[in-house]
Amino acid sequence: MAVPDKIKQEVDKLRQQIEHHNHLYHTLDTPEIPDADYDAIVLRLENLEEEYDLQTPDSPTQRVGSAPLSQFSQVQHELPMLSLNKVFDEADLLAFDARLKKRLDNEKEIQFSCEPKVDGIAVSLLYRDGVLERAATRGDGTTGEDITRNVRTIKSIPLRLKKLKPGTLLEVRGEIFLGKQGFSRLNEKAKVEGSKIFVNPRNTAAGSLRQLDSRMTAKIPLQMYCYSIGLVEGLELPTSLSETFKTLGKWGLPVNSDIGIAVGIDACLEYCLDLLGKRNSLGYEIDGAVLKVDEHELQQDLGSNAKSPRWAMAYKFPAEEKSTKILDVEFQVGRTGTVTPVARLEPVFVGGVTVSNTTLHNMDEIERLGLRIGDTVLVRRAGDVIPKVVKVIQAEKNKKPKKIKMPENCPACGSAVEKEGEVLYKCSAGVICPAQQKESIKHFASRTAMDIEGLGDKLVEQFVDEDVIENIADIFTIDEGQIADLERMGKKSAENLIQAINDSKETSLARFLFSLGIREVGEATAAGLSNHFGNLQSIISADQESLEKVTDIGPIVASHIVTFFANQSNLDLISKLRSVGVNWPDIEVSDQQKPLDGQTFVLTGTLEIMPRSEAKAALMALGAKVAGSVSKNTSCVVAGPGAGSKLTKAEELGIKILDEGEFLAFLDDLT
Ligand code: 9MJ
């Protein structure tokens, strides 16, 4: 078939573009376009090559990655490290399942290993006689880089495998990544030290693995999850992948505990949907799920092509990074008067939601990004739900871009804006500023604070704009007539709101403290204060020193608390709230030592009898701390079915481990 010149030219251009972006992404770690745009270019090239029979061995569609950097010695992978085929929707996943059944010539439902697709760097670890001999990056799938010295600094990767004897050779493959917590801790530290902020966990992990000085790598809390096997000699492995994972875990290798098994493609889809739903609450970044035929024999029957195994498929979730344009930057006033720049964006669908504005945090962030109105930026919706402007990818060039400046006057009340500390700007008006009034009332009424059902953000704004209320105490003197006067408020809604306001008066000390909106006093701190002091008067009269005795309260939070209660208008507001009937029971505080004081517990796997929240509350009531990860400071790990890497780590560190039955007996003994 004659191929039109136009098509040949387009194919050439696409190949050049892909090579360029491959180099930026894989070799230099400085991508210029979002993954979704890159995927679209590759897909276009794949389609054209397929349609016009233009595949050539040197096309980027035939390669797995990009050439390695030259500074590290090269490693030849004896078995190529293949990449995964990808699908982006349900229909293509069903087609994958149908293809498998056809090739196997069997209609029986297939069992799959369902895995989160961790967004990190693929590596190979080679254990000879049970000892880590070599670690290498995937590189282009055939040739990688020797990163053994760097990988040795990763604490979750065992240097010696349990139970593996002389005469054995085992190559395990997996993903090295930086968890969300590790990433935010690094950035908190960077902020304090005034050093460079890291852009995202994947680039940070990739950069640190490519450090020539492994002491630098050791400073980054990298992790790894193993997900496949390469070379094997002198060893019998189980007949399925899922059983192999259990074996790897027993040998001390880290395996993701969020991996599941599903029989049939419908169950796989359920797994994928569930994973997508909990994407934000996972401790690591993912960009999809991977489905693999579980039985090794079936894998062998299906085989691989040059690029990817036929028995595996990546189901990519919607991209979490997209490009869009900064339409404007406005300034918002928070409940404590902080003036924050907010970017108005050309609406963009990212990470499952349409984003049309996002906080830029402070002027330093704008400076760091080098941001101007009209710029095209990369927006990322990461582990948290707040979308973030990651970087400028194309500066506005048509007209002279406007520099973004902090306004001299508060946009809500016109009072002077003053600088406070290093990066904060605040409206100087205090509680008379309507923006501050609105924000503090919204917070007070919110679900986790006083929980006044029906008093949402819009209604609060209306009430303040129409001078119905000015502060949080005024809420309790609103009458039905005032509510009914407002637009779109019927009699029934007015009655319900009055009822909800009255119901909220019966509260707890912790909720009340949180709802006051004291700077940096969140729910956990409020609960800590409430448990420690037991009554409001003791908190009001507490000095800096006694406040710092409360768990997790440091000098800064303590000083915010002291400042809040030193302000007479805050005390007047509290008296007013009490006089209209807001009340709570005091809490009995005892000076007695608790049986688990100073001990840290970690709960992992599924607890089948006692809900996890109850187990946590029971431990805290006995004085223990409940942490999310295992370290040498952990006193005990409670492990239910499905426990994975945390359990492995506890075993490695020789930490006490209880199953749920033993844990319940242990609690019984103490109470
Ligand atoms: C990731 N990235 O989490 C594979 N992957 O298997 C998982 N990648 C993979 N499996 C074969 N869970 C090639 C790549």
Image: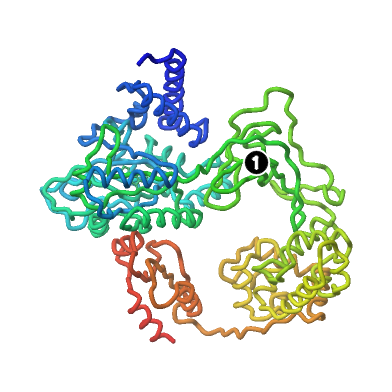
- Is residue 603 positioned above or below 161 on the image? below
Q: In the visual, does 440 lie left or right of 212?
A: right
Q: Nearer the viewer, residue 6 or 327?
A: 6
Q: Position of residue 644 (x, y in %)?
A: 33, 61
Q: Position of residue 290 (x, y in %)?
A: 36, 48
For ligand 1, the image quadrant comes to top left
Residue 9 occupies which quadrant of the picture?
Answer: top left
Where's the C terminus, which quadrant?
Answer: bottom left
| Label 1: which secondary element | strand
- Figure disc tally: 1
Q: Position of residue 489 (x, y in %)?
A: 81, 66
Q: In the visual, does 471 lie left or right of 148?
A: right
Q: In the visual, does 97 lie left or right of 349?
A: left
Which scheme is used to colour this image of the protein? rainbow
Q: Nearer the viewer, residue 483 or 626?
A: 483
Residue, disc 1: 347
Residue 444 occupies which quadrant of the picture?
Answer: bottom right
Q: In the visual, does 57 lie left or right of 393?
A: left
* Residue sitting at x 42%, y 53%: 272
Say whether residue 152 is visible: no
* Residue sitting at x 88%, y 61%: 466
* Residue sitting at x 76%, y 74%: 496
- Is residue 343 positioned above or below 538 on the image? above
- Is the residue indicated by label 1 positioned so its CB lies within 8 Å of ligand 1? no
Q: Nearer the viewer, residue 452 or 386?
A: 452
Which kind of residue does numbered mark 1 sit on?
Pro
Say whether residue 168 is visible: yes
Q: Position of residue 571 (x, y in %)?
A: 80, 72
Within 10 Å of the Cα at label 1, are there few (<14), some (14-19), or many (20+) other Cα atoms? Answer: some
